[in-house]
Image (tube, rainbow, N blue to C red):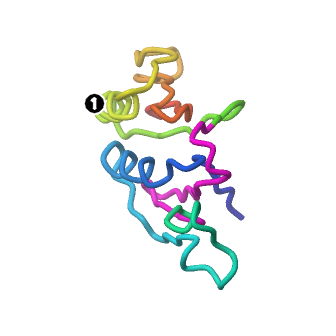
Amino acid sequence: MQIQPYLNFDGRCDEAIAFYKKAVGAEVKVLMRWKDAPEGMSTPQNADKVMHSSIKIGDATVMMSDGRLTGHPEFKGISLSLIAKDPAEAETLFKALGDGGQVQMPISKTFFSPAFGMVADKFGVSWMVVVM
């Protein structure tokens, strides 16, 4: 059994996919647009938007879509944890995810990890970067 997060980017999914490809080496596994759905499902407003996508980050799958197309995604009460192999990798990932975002807790050594930090990326997705 697996749990796979499903993130709705409210019209910014293409931008998010490009960001995660650059920031954490995400690989696109599935990308379906509304215009490719059966007739009658798409509208002129959503035709080129992402109906469903699946990206692979390391060994994990994250599913994503454009959701309701408001342009203002909100991610509250959840964080994605990203396990780095060492403090140098953690620092690199933390910096990349934080580009245009907001540091919630600077990455530093803690009692439980040689490197741990929390950052919200430019879409508002909270990430915990940690070396275990």
Q: Tell me if mark 1 has few (under 14), some (14-19) or many (20+) residues whose alpha carbon lies within 10 angstroms of its own.
A: few
- Residue visible at 55% across and 68% down in the picture: 47
Horizontal placement of 74 versus 128: left or right? right
Q: Position of residue 12 (x, y in %)?
A: 50, 47
User: Circle 1 sits on which residue?
Assistant: 88
Q: Is residue 34 left or right of residue 113?
A: right
Residue 71 on the magenta segment: yes
5 sits left or right of 19 in the view:
right
Residue 24, percent across and down?
36, 46
Q: What's the amino acid at mark 1? A: Ala
Quarter of the image with the N terminus is bottom right
Viewer-proximal residue among 8 and 116: 8
Q: Please report the bounds of the magenta region as a residue range.
A: 51-73
Q: Is residue 123 above or below residue 1?
A: above
Q: Is residue 87 above or below residue 107?
A: below
Residue 89 in magenta? no
- Seen in the picture, residue 72 relative to 65 is either above or below; the reply is above
